[in-house]
Image (spheres, rainbow, N blue to C red):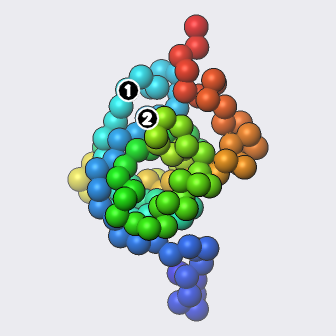
Amino acid sequence: MDKNGSERREFPRLPLITPLAYKICKKETLTKLFEGYTVNVSQNGLLCNIKDKVNMDDILWLSFNKSDLSFCQDMDKTSFVYQNGIVGKVVRIEGKDDGTFDVGINIITREEKNLTNIYPRIHFMDKH
C-alpha cells in the first residue's frame, strides 16, 4: 500500500496456500525439482514460501493447483506456459526467521517471453 493507504498493485492478491513445485532455470539446477507453497496469487504474480535460496531476476518454472481460483484460467491464457507450469521472474526475496524465504514472482506473459530472453531451448533443455 502507498502512503494514502491505497493498493499499488494492478491486480489484487488473493490468499492461496497450496503446494508448489518449481525449477530454477539454470543449467546447474534445471534437473532438480524443488518444493514450497504458494501464499497468495494474483493475475500477474504470486508470493511463495520456499526453503532454497534463489536470486533476484532468477527465472523459475512453477507448478501449483490453480483450480481453486477462477482468474487463474485467464492467467493460463496470458502466461508463458511450459510443460503445464508457468514461468516467472523473481522480483522480491525476504528471509524468514525459520530459515525459509518468501519470494515474490512476476509471471512472464507470452508477449514478454522473447523480450526477457526466455527461450525454452536455452532455459529448459539441457545444453551439451
Separation (CA) of disc 2 from disc 1: 6 Å
In the image, taking residue 123 as reference, residue 113 lies left or right, namely: right
> As rendered, which of 127 and 83 lies closer to the eye?
83
Q: Earlier in the sequence, mark 2 or mark 1?
A: 2
* 38 over 32 or under it: above or below: below
What element does badge 2 sit on? strand
* 108 over 1 or under it: above or below: above
Q: Are the residues at dot 2 and dot 1 in contact (C-beta closer than 8 Å)?
A: yes
Q: Which residue is mark 2?
A: 23
> As rendered, which of 36 and 5 lies closer to the eye?
36
* 107 over 9 or under it: above or below: above
**Residue 114 numbered mark, or none:** none
Residue 54 lies in what quarter of the image?
top left
> As rendered, which of 90 and 86 lies closer to the eye?
86
Q: Residue furthest top?
A: 128
In the image, taking residue 80 as reference, residue 33 lies left or right, namely: left
Q: Amino acid at mark 2?
A: Lys
